[in-house]
Amino acid sequence: MDTNTQPADDLHDALLGEARHLIGWLIGELAAALSRPPGQDLSARMLRWTLRHLLVPAEALMRRALRLLMADLPPEAPKAPAATRPAPSRNACRREAQPRRPVFRLTEPPVRPRTVYLPPDQRPRISVPGLTPLIPAKAGAANRGPGPAALEAKLQRRLAALQDAYANPMPLARRLLRLRTARPDRPKLTLAYTRPPGFHTRGLAGPGRDIYHRLNETALAAELRFPDSS
């Protein structure tokens, strides 16, 4: 037996420490990028850069860290069904209605196969005068996506959800464990491990990309080893 081999828990702890430091740095960069002097608006171009190069990799790192935390948790005992409670009155619902905190997304959309398809308004406009008409450009094609104000509000909500997950990750890790235990028929791989989001962005230049690579590979191995509850 190799005495230099570290237990899996120790390796997870060391990698999670590196990932936490990296996520914390990205959160700080995000907060700085979204702060602005009074009366000054952020440009759509700057907001899109912040989304792609800072927020997307930070969220992806957090999701993979949660998979490692879930893998180290003991299985939960099945809970007895809760007693049926009467539905609250309409007035009580109105009193308790408050703005909900944004919820951190635990999954990622599946990787789509790359295609060479182009929509009609993006295809080369080759025509013969008098024979083939030009394909009209799509209205508003140059201004796709939300405006700066809507995009900034979306980024702020996702940043708040990420900050909550970073500050208190264990409830989310336990939620993942409950979902996996309750639904063993669901696909195991709920993250885009083959093309991890934000891996090649500028926010991860240098050692950050190495941490991301190791975290992605370790989280994938942990999910593949996770036992079914069936």
Image (spheres, rainbow, N blue to C red):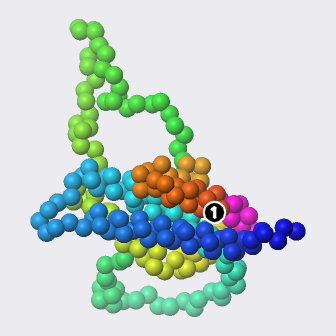
Q: Image quadrant for the N terminus?
A: bottom right
Crowd rating for badge 1 (residues with CA inside 10 Å; few <14, some 14–19, many 20+): many
Q: Is residue 156 above or below residue 216?
A: below
Q: Specify the segment rendered in magenta.
A: 219-230
Residue 136 is situated, as x and y percent measured from the top left of the image, at: 25, 26
> As shown in the figure, which amino acid type bears the numbered disc 1?
Ala
Residue at the location (31% across, 78% down)? 99
Q: Quadrant of residue 127?
A: top left
In this view of the protein, which residue sits in the foreground, 5 or 77? 5
- Residue 66 appears in the rendering: no
Residue 145 place in picture, x, y as percent: 29, 48
Q: Position of residue 193 (x, y in %)?
A: 59, 54
- Is 135 on the left-hand or right-hand side of 205? left
Q: Secondary structure at mark 1?
A: helix
Q: What residue is at 56 percent from the left and 60 percent from the top?
A: 211
The answer to whether residue 222 is magenta is yes
- In the rendered image, residue 59, in percent from the top left (x then y), is placed at 46, 63
For the point 78% across and 68% down, the residue is 5
Q: Foreground: 39 or 119?
A: 39
How many badges with numbers are in the image?
Answer: 1
Q: From what the image shows, is residue 46 above or below residue 152?
A: above
Residue, disc 1 = 219
Furthest residue toward right: 1
Along the horizontal axis of the image, is 51 left or right of 110?
left
Q: Is residue 100 visible?
A: yes
